[in-house]
Image (cartoon, rainbow, N blue to C red):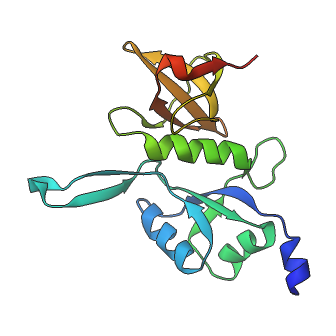
């Protein structure tokens, strides 16, 4: 493939499930070695006896991969990576997460502490759609959720994985 034709290949965020339990971080490392952009939501915590930190996947078996469709398929058919692409139920094609939605999800997840946010595995009753207007999450679109008197911005992917971060109410603008 020439440099001109390779630049026209469109990359998307695809969602994969690892075939084996607790192999998300290992899959992330393999994809990184193959120079494939990816994201695995993780949480860090102190090891027992307080010696060092440990990293654990926050969303069981999920790996987000940004590549073109042909390369995505080749990861499984040619590289034999133990993962499966999730499908969009309506179209029966590989599930694609829009770039803006993935960027918002990553930003919310990466800034949230375990106490203030992180992965949520259940959907909520829908709150007002909002946009963050200040701070490190400026420009993120999500939904407002109030829990125990605290305000959170929640960003969801494919209606099944959600991230939240605590945000001052003054930094939110209702989207109409």
Q: Which residue appears farthest toward the top when viewing the image?
A: 149
Out of 92 and 116, give the one closest to the viewer. 116
Can residue 23 be seen in the rendering of this structure? no
Can residue 98 be seen in the rendering of this structure? yes
Count all numbered tags in the image, as a single digit. 0
174, above or below 114, in the image: above
31, above or below 161, in the image: below
Out of 110 and 57, give the one closest to the viewer. 110
Out of 78 and 125, give the one closest to the viewer. 125
- Residue ID at (43%, 64%): 25
Position of the N terminus by quadrant: bottom right
Residue 33: percent from left, percent from top = 53, 80
102, above or below 12, in the image: above
- Residue ID at (69%, 57%): 14
106, above or below 10, in the image: above
Q: Which residue appears farthest toward the bottom when viewing the image?
A: 2
Residue 93: percent from left, percent from top = 81, 54
Q: Is residue 54 left or right of residue 42?
A: left
Residue 176: percent from left, percent from top = 76, 16
Q: Which residue appears farthest toward the front when viewing the image?
A: 134
Residue 59: percent from left, percent from top = 47, 48
């Amino acid at each position: 493939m020439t440099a001109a034709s390779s630049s026209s290949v469109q990359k998307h965020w695809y969602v994969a499930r690892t075939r084996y339990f607790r192999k998300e971080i290992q899959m992330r490392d393999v994809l990184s070695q193959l120079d494939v952009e990816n994201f695995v939501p993780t949480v860090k915590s102190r090891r027992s006896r307080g010696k060092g930190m440990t990293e654990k996947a926050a969303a069981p078996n999920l790996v987000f991969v940004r590549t073109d469709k042909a390369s995505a398929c080749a990861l499984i058919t040619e590289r034999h990576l133990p993962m499966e692409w999730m499908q969009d139920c309506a179209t029966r094609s590989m599930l694609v997460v829009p770039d803006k939605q993935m960027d918002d999800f990553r930003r919310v997840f990466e800034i949230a502490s375990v106490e203030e946010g992180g992965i949520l595995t259940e959907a909520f009753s829908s709150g007002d759609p909002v946009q963050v207007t200040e701070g490190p999450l400026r420009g993120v679109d999500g939904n407002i959720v109030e829990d125990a008197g605290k305000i959170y911005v929640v960003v969801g992917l494919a209606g099944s994985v959600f991230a939240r971060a605590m945000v001052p109410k003054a930094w939110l603008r209702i989207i109409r």
